[in-house]
Amino acid sequence: MVKRSDNMDSSSECSRGAHKRLLQDSRSYDQENAMKKVCIGTRTEYTYAPYHDGYRWRKYGQKMIRGNSFPRCYYRCTYHQDHGCPASKHVEQHNSEDPPLFRVIYTNEHTCGTSNSASDYMASSMQIQQIADASLRKAQAAERLRKAEVETPRLMHFPPPRCSGGYNMAMKEEKDVIVSSLLTVIRGCHIAESAGNNSAAALPVNRPPPAVARSDHYSCSYAISPELLPASDDLTLDFMLDSVLDPHWVEPLDLAWLKESTHTG
DNA sequence: CGCATTTGACCCAA
DNA sequence: TTGGGTCAAATGCG
């Protein structure tokens, strides 16, 4: 029978997750633990993508916590047995918003040697979150557009004056955010690809890191979190559709020829 | 077939 | 006694 062996490591993980952290609980879990008992090797993060922090985790339990609406899931590093990696984390949904925010409590440092690829995933996670935020904002803009259309339906049949405020400016702002986010992702891939022979760094966004001393083919742990998939897919589709069907937004390109060719052809 | 997940039971500290 | 954390058998999946 395996007894509790997750001894608290005194090493800190603060630097590794600093750039990924969305929010830091002002009354952090660490402080709470410090008041109860010494628990140095823990830190708390709030994230929209709790399952994709660059490491491979294996779920070993789930429990409803008293006072919480959502269950707490318990994960250990996949290499817990192979390499004796002591890292573990608890994930619990923090709210029921869309996308939901998760609280992730990390315990102990990884000793399995996957931290290099993990840093890439941190960046990827940030980019995914950027896209999700942009998508959310776009949905809000669409809602505003719908309201505006209800109020002044005839105006929608004509191209609105460019950059003249109102919904026009709002839509342009949303588009700028989305384009910026996509460029960030694309640029990230290019930077990674130009980084040389580092195969881990050259991985595109959301690709799994190379297995460490292992040849299994399981990759489900790397899939984009289900909360994020619809947002990114919609974003891609909306971006493409808007660019083609709403040509007055694409300043440098005159797509009138495209309309003409489709009509005459 | 092997690994990941699920889930009820168990352990243990408060 | 209670609640949080973990175990391990059963099950699912590729």
Image (cartoon, coloured by chain):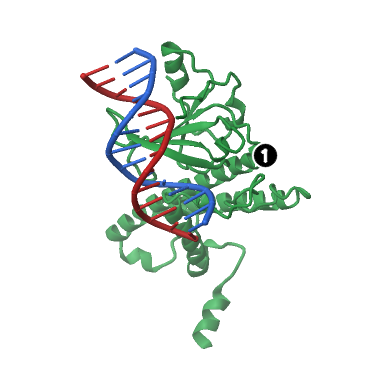
Chain colours: A green, B blue, C red
Residue found 52% across the figure and 67% down from its top? A247
Q: Quadrant of the N terminus of chain A?
A: top left
Label 1 is placed on what type of residue?
A: Asn
Position in image of residue A237 (x %, y %): 48, 63
Q: Quadrant of residue A28?
A: top left
- Give me the chain letter of mark 1: A
Residue A27 locus on image (x, y percent): 42, 19
Total marks shown come to: 1
Pick whichever, A150 or A107, lies toward us. A107
| Residue beneath disc 1 | A116
Instruction: Estimate the x, y position of residue A55 in percent, counting from the top left.
Output: 57, 40
In terms of depth relative to the viewer, which is nearer, A159 or A80?
A80
Q: Residue at x 58, y 42 (%)?
A: A54
A52 up-or-down from A182: above or below: above
Compared with residue A32, is residue A191 higher up or lower down, i.e. above or below?
below
Q: Is A213 on the left or on the right of A92, as rendered?
A: right
Left or right position of A157 against A190: left
Question: Closest to the observer: C6 or A26?
Answer: C6
